Image (spheres, helix red, strand yellow):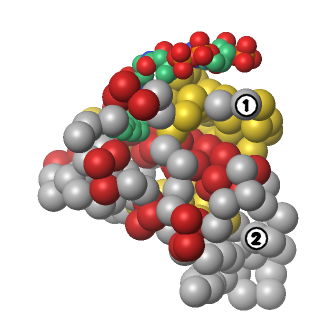
Amino acid sequence: MVTRRAEAAGGAGATVDEGPAVQDHYPADAAHCYGCGARNPFGHHLKTRWADGSRTETITRFTPGPEQTAMPGYVYGGLVASVLDCSGTGSAALAGTHAAGLDLEGDGSLRYVTGTLEVRYQRPTPMSVELVVRGRVEEVKGRKVTVALTMTAGEDEVASGRVVALQLPDEMRSS
Ligand SMILES: CCCCCCCCCCCC(=O)SCCNC(=O)CCNC(=O)[C@H](O)C(C)(C)COP(=O)(O)OP(=O)(O)OC[C@H]1O[C@@H](n2cnc3c(N)ncnc32)[C@H](O)[C@@H]1OP(=O)(O)O
């Protein structure tokens, strides 16, 4: 499956969403996360895909609602962190699964948890605008994946950060 959503068709900075969302291929016993788990009815249901064919850049989209307000018209910073967090673990899952030579749709995804999350709030994040998080896979080293992230709202970069994600230890899996 290939999903393509050109932001500015043919223009500079055009971005496409490429292929399946990694979260749709998480193991069922590790799909309850508030940010990205398909099995959490109250969560954000973030979807992270490769942004292009290079297998180093990812994209995740989320539109916040009024219940996620910090002050009228602006998004709560914890929500910004949450979206960066699960965009990072999703990017790590894409990269780790790819590096392991596994096929996302055939084999399913490896699962990652956050070891470290860094967030830099650069500008107030406007409410009810689609937030686009771009991930850049910096390193895949054993069970550890490092991903640099930026979040834009329209033309503005509102936040950036970095996630160090570790492959989910077996003891954290539920039966
Ligand atoms: C049913 C459940 C479903 C669960 C499904 C959950 C999915 C949630 C996804 C959404 C994000 C979340 O909210 S996750 C929830 C928040 N996160 C957590 O609760 C994680 C709590 N922390 C842990 O369980 C642990 O500390 C881990 C798993 C992160 C790491 O322990 P470990 O796996 O034993 O790591 P270890 O072998 O010692 O180290 C391997 C390499 O990683 C580095 N490293 C180790 N810890 C960290 C760290 N915190 N930050 C950076 N780097 C680290 C080491 O220096 C080493 O680098 P080198 O020497 O090789 O270079």
Q: Nearer the viewer, residue 138 or 65?
A: 138
- Image coordinates of residue 110 in percent, x first then y, are 54, 49
- Residue 52 got which mark? 2
Task: Identify the residue position indicated by label 1 in the image.
Answer: 142
Tell me the SS state at disc 1: loop
The residue sitting at 35% across, 28% down in the picture is 172
Local crowd size for mark 1, using a 10 Å CA cut-off: few (<14), some (14–19), many (≥20): few
Q: Is residue 149 left or right of residue 174?
A: right
Whether residues under marks 2 and 1 lie with C-beta atoms below 8 angstroms apart, the answer is: no
Using the image, determine if residue 158 lies above or below residue 6.
above
* Disc 1 Cβ-to-ligand 1 distance below 8 Å: yes
Using the image, determine if residue 110 lies above or below residue 55.
above
Q: Amino acid at mark 1?
A: Gly
Q: Is residue 4 visible?
A: yes
Q: Marks 2 and 1, Cα distance to the nearest angstrom?
A: 24 Å
- Image coordinates of residue 158 in percent, x first then y, are 56, 43
- Image coordinates of residue 45 in percent, x first then y, are 32, 59
Q: Earlier in the sequence, mark 2 or mark 1?
A: 2
The residue sitting at 74% across, 45% down in the picture is 137
Quarter of the view holding residue 128: bottom left
Using the image, determine if residue 45 lies above or below residue 119.
below
Q: Amino acid at mark 2?
A: Asp
